[in-house]
Amino acid sequence: MVGASPPPSPLPFLYENETYEYCIVLPPKVNSAGIWENETSPLVIFNYSLPLLEMQVVLTFVITHVIYTILRPLGITLFASQMFAGITMSPMMNLQAFRSIFFNKELSIEVIDTVSMFGFALFLFLTGVKMDMKLALRTTKRSVGIGVVSLLSSILVGAAINETFKQPNETEQVKTERLIGTMVEALTSFSVIACLLAELKILNTELGRLALTSAAVGDLSTMFLVHVMSLSRNFTASPLLVIERVVIMFCFITLIIFVFRPLMYWVIKRTPDGGPVAEVYITATMMVALGCAVFTHWVDRSPLIGAFLFGLAVPDGPPLGSALIDKFECFINAFFLSIYVTASTLRANFGNMLSDPSHVKFFTFFFSMTFLAKLIPCCIGSFLNFMPFRDSLAFGLVMSSKGIVQLSHYSTFRDNQVLSETVFTAMVIAILVNATIIPILVRFLYDPVSRKYAAYEQRNIMHLKPDSELRILACVHTSDNVPAMINLLDLTCPTRESPNVVYVLHLIQLMARNSPVFIAHHNHESSTATAKSFEKIIPFYQYEGNNWGLVTVNAFTVITPRKLMHEDICTMALDKQTSFIILPFHRKWSIDGSLEEENNVVRNLNCTVLDQAPCSVGILID
């Protein structure tokens, strides 16, 4: 039996570590002898932890995807389906088969909890890999204002409600529960919003980009605020302990920035251009991520924050960041994340919710008001920045969405015995309702495809005046596209009376980030992707130099999912008022005339641009 810890801090969030008491059977019964161990009772294998875990995983996966298959046409997300699966297997359903598997008297759900927590730590590591820290640093005043105001408004409304309903004989636990509800409801999670935008396929729209930048600001602001509150509360009780923790975390972050991050750049330099990262480096990176989680656990902090901070230090994009995402994201999201969400929902006891109507009424009112406190400022802020009303409402709903991060906070508090079973259940229901309704409403309010480009049908080469400026959008995928593109531009024969303005757009598939990235090369923005993009951009600048005064070149790089790449092409054509889009052909021939390569992804992209482009489109066959 593990020893008990001192009373938990009221605000551990992702940052503090706790010790729990569990009774275990020694020696532990892990492997069974198979279903023939007891011919009369083959279910005896579920008295062993490994077969029990395997059955729990199979049931979780099957039930989740059956529910998702049924509810997906209604607009229900995978996260909500995972929560519904947890409800299906919870004590409320009173199904004997699930009770014997998930609520075993000896093993209970501690094993699946441990596995799911391990998976969630890896998920946060990959979230850190995907998160672009520069996104929050280069945000506009609009994003900063919306992110900060939405956070503060929720906190103020939650605090006002707590003060209004405060009772004279209110216990410390009730005060703590309401404080937790206020802080978590005010949280705007970058990863939750990015996942929602990706599932709704609006990740790189104007609304999606504004939501991501505002969420990044809100996420960092919340992290800073929670750290300050936690340290200030603990400083009164034990100043030396707080100073010790601050020094240790400072040394840990310094180690990550000045030792591990340069080592990862060294790995990138050793990787051939366009080649795969060696397996030994990928394995070493994952081992260091787990080591960071163990270290923060050892210094009495949550293992989750160690993995997340190390993920932030991994250079985003190819080759290292994309290699980590390619190898581990599918397995972690499909396996570990599903287990984590379902296991967290299993803790809720929905059958006991109605036993205390006063709690139900209070939290219904509380969650409704804090939701509106975040929704309304976001709607007003975006509407005042010339966003249409329907889009503003959709933006406010996206910013008010809840997901796995909020669920993880509540689960942590429940494990720490800070939240009662009834309050935890109410919070889980609030997340489930939010995650179910918001995607449906956003799909109804915001449909960018249906109304795009309708007013720009006459802006093409045919309607261009003879003496006007020719604006061209030249799209490039690889270096092979560049020579033929420049030769075609040279054939346009620009003059001083009718010059060319060429917008070069280098298209890169989004692989190791949650957020799309748009780079303007004339602004000298630097990154790993920029350095490799510049190799394809330099010939266009040389072409500009050879035709000085006749041609103006503006080069950009966009890193975005393949399925949404046409959005960036058409949006830039609109913004820059181009009359002609040039796209590379999807086939490549060798010198002897035989077909060397056929790229169906590029073919589908070209077809989509042809359907939706606001101007003339030409496909360049080299």
Image (cartoon, rainbow, N blue to C red):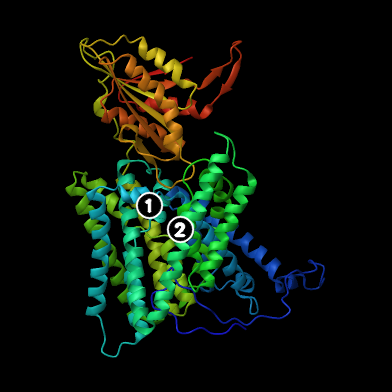
**Amino acid type, label 2:** Ala
| Left or right of 228 on screen, residue 52 | right
Look at the numbered disc 2 and give the secondary structure of its residue: helix
Image coordinates for residue 125, horizontal then vertical, percent: 50, 56
Q: Is residue 475 visible?
A: yes
In the drawing, what numbered circle is on residue 151?
A: none
List x then y, in percent, for residue 550: 27, 14
The residue that mark 1 highlights is 439
User: Badge 1: few (under 14), some or many (20 or more) residues near its Cα, within 10 Å?
Assistant: many
Image coordinates for residue 267, horizontal then vertical, percent: 56, 44
Residue 461's quadrant in the figure? top left
Q: Quadrant of residue 458?
A: top left
- In this rendering, the count of numbered labels is 2
Q: What residue is shown with label 2?
A: 80
Residue under the image location 31 percent in, 30 percent down: 572
Q: Nearer the viewer, residue 136 or 451?
A: 136
Q: Is residue 183 above or below residue 558?
A: below
Q: Is residue 360 visible?
A: no
Residue in front for this viewpoint, 549 or 190? 549
Mark 1: amino acid? Pro
Q: Are dots 2 and 1 in contact, CB under 8 Å?
A: yes
Place of residue 216 in the rendered image (x, y in percent of width and height, measured from the top left): 34, 54
Tell me which label, 2 or 1, sits earlier in the chain.
Answer: 2
Crowding around mark 2 (Cα neighbors within 10 Å: few <14, some 14 to 19, many 20+) is: many
Measured Cα–Cα span from mark 2 to mark 1: 10 Å
Quarter-of-image position of residue 290: bottom right
Residue at x 50%, y 49% (from the top left corner): 262
Q: Residue at x 19, y 46 (%)?
A: 385
Up/down of 502 relative to 159, above or below: above
41, 615: nearer the viewer: 615
Seen in the picture, residue 265 relative to 224 is either above or below; the reply is above
Q: Residue at x 50, y 67 (%)?
A: 87
